[in-house]
Image (cartoon, rainbow, N blue to C red):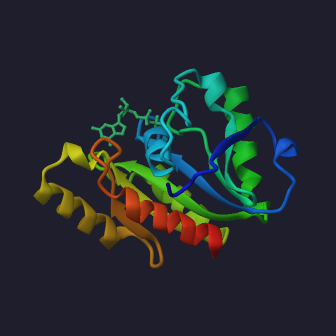
Amino acid sequence: MQFPNVRFLLSVANQQQFPQDPGREVAFAGRSNAGKSSAINSILQRNGLARTSKTPGRTRLLNFFEIEAGQRIVDLPGYGYATAPPPERKQWTELINSLPRREFFKGLFLIIDIRRGIKVEDGQLIEWALASGWQVHLLLAKCDKLNQRDRSVALKEAQEVLPEGVTVQLFSAHNGIGIEPAQKRLLEMLRS
Ligand code: GDP
């Protein structure tokens, strides 16, 4: 097993609650329903580790998972929730804005539904992550929904619009496409 010691660490609502012990962290982000929880679970080989919660209150939290001592992933709340009440949205914005100052963050895995493509919000997040000095990797998720030809077209289109240095791959939690390369890229970021 690639990640034998994975465990849920904690959920945080503000930056004061972030883990203090030194380490390297990779954040997972994406529009809600893009397939982020499924991607985390299949990359870390644990069913039900990252839970889908459609309750806005719960989804405002950041969830930390430990892969090994000093290696963590951080599940960011899905964006694109137009329904979250303003105070909650403010809290989430503050929390997210505090991330670039966190020296432990090394990279971002951005999960995109391959059928939707890269939207303005995704692009903003990519720019923001690059400006913060993070590595960025895109998963074109749910690629099982497209045939071989359309997958290749979507991959090529993404490669053409992404800024230099950003990597991208096809991914499907349902039929296992791209799990291994995603694990490799994650470890690369955690060890860089
Ligand atoms: P999240 O909101 O981004 O965490 O997304 P989830 O992982 O909860 O997935 C949202 C929906 O997409 C669920 O109904 C999943 O079953 C479905 N889904 C997730 N990954 C895949 C995939 O690789 N292929 C297909 N066909 N559906 C998926």
Residue at figure coordinates x 38%, y 66% from the top left: 168
Please tell me in which quadrant of the rendered image residue 129 appears.
Answer: bottom right
Quarter location, residue 148: bottom left
Nearer-the-camera pick, 90 or 9: 9
Q: Is residue 4 visible?
A: yes
On the image, the x and y values in percent for residue 173 come to 35, 44
Pick out the residue farthest to the bottom: 164
Residue 141's place in the image compared with 181, above or below, is above
> Image quadrant for the C terminus?
bottom right
Answer with left or right where residue 73 lies relative to residue 36: right
Give whichever of 65, 151 is nearer the camera: 65
Q: Is residue 64 left or right of residue 114?
A: right
* Res. 134 in view: no
Question: What residue do we see at 52% from left, 62% from top?
Answer: 126
**Residue 174 horizontal side relative to residue 8, left or right:** left
Residue at image position (60%, 64%) is 107
Residue 27 drawn at (x, y percent):
61, 54
